[in-house]
Amino acid sequence: MMINTKLKQIFIITVFSIIIPFHASAFTLPTVPGITGGDSAGFSLGDGKTELVDKFFSSSNNYLNALALLNKALGKNVEAAQIEKAIEYANDPGIDESDRMKNSIKTSNEASKSIETDLNNQSTVITAEGQVFYAQSLPPAGKGLIGTIQMIPVTKNMVNGIKANPISAIGEIGGLAKVIPNLPSYIQTIQKTMKLIQSRAKAEGIDGADDPALEAAEDDFDL
C-alpha cells in the first residue's frame, strides 16, 4: 500500500510539472500597439512620429491652401491672409513641431467651421471671380483629403500608444504627445467640411466639382 501511495504522488507531481509550464506559455499579456516593441509589427512612437509628422504637414498645407482660396472665393481676403500666415508658420523649421502642428489644427478647425457657416447660408453669393477661386481650391482640397486619409492608420497607432502610457510618450516624442490625440476630431472635421465644399461646388456648377476621386476618397475614412 505504501508503495502504491508513493507511486500516485510521483505521478501527480509529474503531471503538474508538465501542465503548469504549458499554461504559462499559452497565456501571455496582450501587447499594446504604439509602444516600442509592443505589437508584432514592431511599431514604435518614435518611428510613427516621423511618418505622421511628414504626412500631416503635407496634407494640412494642401487643405489650408484650399481654405485660403475658398475664403478668397467668398471675398474674405483678411481671413485668407491669416490662413496663408498659418501655412508659413507650419513650414518654419525653426519652430517646434508640436507648436506648428497645434497651430495648423487650430487654424484648420476654425477656418473649416467658418467655411461651413458661409456655404450653408443660401444667401451667400459666389461671384464669377469667386467661382474661379473656388475652382482653384478643389485640387489642393482633394490632395489634402487624400493625404489625410493616408495618415489615418499611423494616427490610430500613435493615439493608442500615447493613451497606453502618456508619461512614456512625452519622454519619447515630446510635446506631440499632447497634440496628436486631437487628430481624430481634426480628421472628422475635414471630412465633414469637404462634403459641404463639394456639394456647394456642384450646386454652383464649379469646374472640377464632379471629380469622382474625391467622392471615393471620402468613403475611405475609418476612425
Image (cartoon, rainbow, N blue to C red):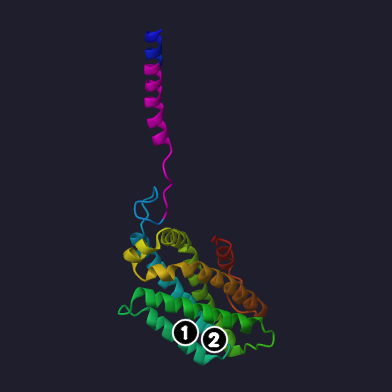
Vertical comparison of 19 with 148: above or below: above
> Which segment is the magenta one?
9-33
Closer to the camera, 50 or 210?
A: 50
Image quadrant where residue 161 sits:
bottom left
Label 2 vs 1, first from the N-terminus? 2
Distance from Cα at disc 2 to Cα at disc 1: 9 Å
Q: Residue 66, how many percent across, how many down?
A: 50, 79
Magenta segment, prevailing SS (helix, strand or loop): helix
Q: Which mark is residue 152?
A: none
Q: Residue 206, how many percent across, how many down?
A: 61, 79
Q: Residue 194, how many percent across, how many down?
A: 57, 73
> For the image shown, how many numbered marks are present on the structure?
2
In contact (CB < 8 Å): disc 2 and disc 1: yes
Q: Which residue is mark 1?
A: 83
Is residue 136 visible in the rendered image? The answer is no
Q: Which residue is mark 2?
A: 71
- Whether residue 128 appears in magenta in the rendering, the answer is no
Closer to the camera, 94 or 34?
A: 34
Q: Residue at x 37, y 63 (%)?
A: 167
Closer to the camera, 126 or 90?
A: 90
Q: Residue at x 42, y 86 (%)?
A: 85
Q: Amino acid at mark 2?
A: Asn
Vertical comparison of 190 with 166: above or below: below
Q: Amino acid at mark 1?
A: Ile
Q: Residue at x 34, y 80 (%)?
A: 92
Q: Is residue 196 left or right of residue 53?
A: right
- Whether residue 18 appears in magenta in the rendering, the answer is yes
> Label 2 crowding class (10 Å Cα cut-off): few <14, some 14-19, many 20+?
many
Q: Residue furthest top?
A: 1
- Quarter the C terminus occupies: bottom right
- Quarter the N terminus occupies: top left
